[in-house]
Image (cartoon, rainbow, N blue to C red):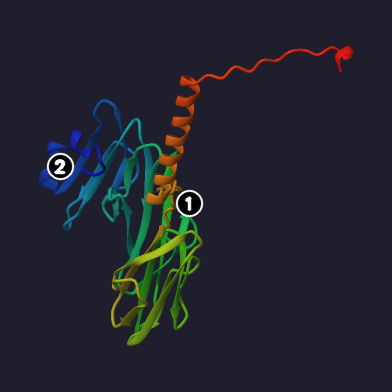
Amino acid sequence: MVGPEADSHRLEPSNEAIALRRWSFTAVAAAGSTFAGWSGACSGAGPTCAVTMSEARTVGAAFVDNAHYTLTVTGGTGGVVTTTPGAIDCGTRCIAGFAAGAAVSVIAHPDHGYRFAGWSGACSGTSTCDLTMNANAAVQATFAPVAAGQFALTVHDFGEGAIVSVPGGINCGTACSAAFASGTEVTLLATPAPGYRFSGWSGACSGAQACVVWMDDLANVSALFAPIPVPVATAPIPTLAEWAMALMGLLILGIGCLRLSTNPRTLSVRSISASQR
């Protein structure tokens, strides 16, 4: 079973197939959800799946809550595709449901002998595929073979910023996966976009300084850029001298009002005619 709602469903093998080493599964969705499709040794969205057990196999069945949107990922030969949050791990779990408005990052992981060549469908390019699930979506990842004696370096970028490599090959946003000759020392440099700061590396590197990778094997590096918080304007706290001046002003005003109330003064006005002037 796969997907966030999978625990409320069942797969049913037919009884007559066991002796023939051929299994037939039927997906039965619980109330309030829909069967979205098969992955692994089966494909498509038909209700049944037949598997001939000539070797160990894995079958995934995705059920999606009717209130959720469906994300379908196709990995193809040469790599695995995962998501954050982690409902998809394709290879075996390629379909999952996500709540409306959910932010989902789709990440490509090439196998040995391959590099990530790019997205199609709901995403394009080679950067991390970031989606907001306001509709059903499908994403396809393509992997390309690398030459003998080379290893792929793949950068996964999160947030807004650019990563370049020395020697060249990586320029992520646009080129986030490249092959380097075995034994090459590759330095990755991160530059945040305006309004962001570089938070650090993970994977083959750590910390927030330049990332140096020795290409003696396949390598994956993640770079995280975080928004710079906008400072909240606050009123300045008065000093003791300012408090003292304010209190003195209140005392003087109070004394003046008290004197006026206890010692009233009468001002008489009389008119003078023009003839008296």
Nearest the eye: 258 or 130: 258
**Residue at the spot 17% in from the left edge and 57% down from the top edge:** 54
> Judging from the image, what secondary structure is the residue with disc 1 in?
strand
Nearest the eye: 256 or 156: 256
Which residue appears farthest toward the left when viewing the image?
19
Q: Which quadrant of the figure has residue 219?
A: bottom left
Residue 205 percent location from the top left of the image: 30, 73
Q: Amino acid at mark 1?
A: Gly
Residue 101 in sight? yes
From this view, report whether residue 74 is shown above or below residue 166.
Answer: above
Nearest the eye: 73 or 265: 265
**Residue at the spot 48% in from the left edge and 59% down from the top edge:** 195
Q: Which residue in the protein does label 2 denote?
A: 17
Q: Which quadrant of the figure has residue 111?
A: bottom left
The earlier-in-sequence mark between 2 and 1 is: 2
Q: Which residue in the protein does label 1 denote?
A: 121
Give left or right: position of 53 versus 64.
left
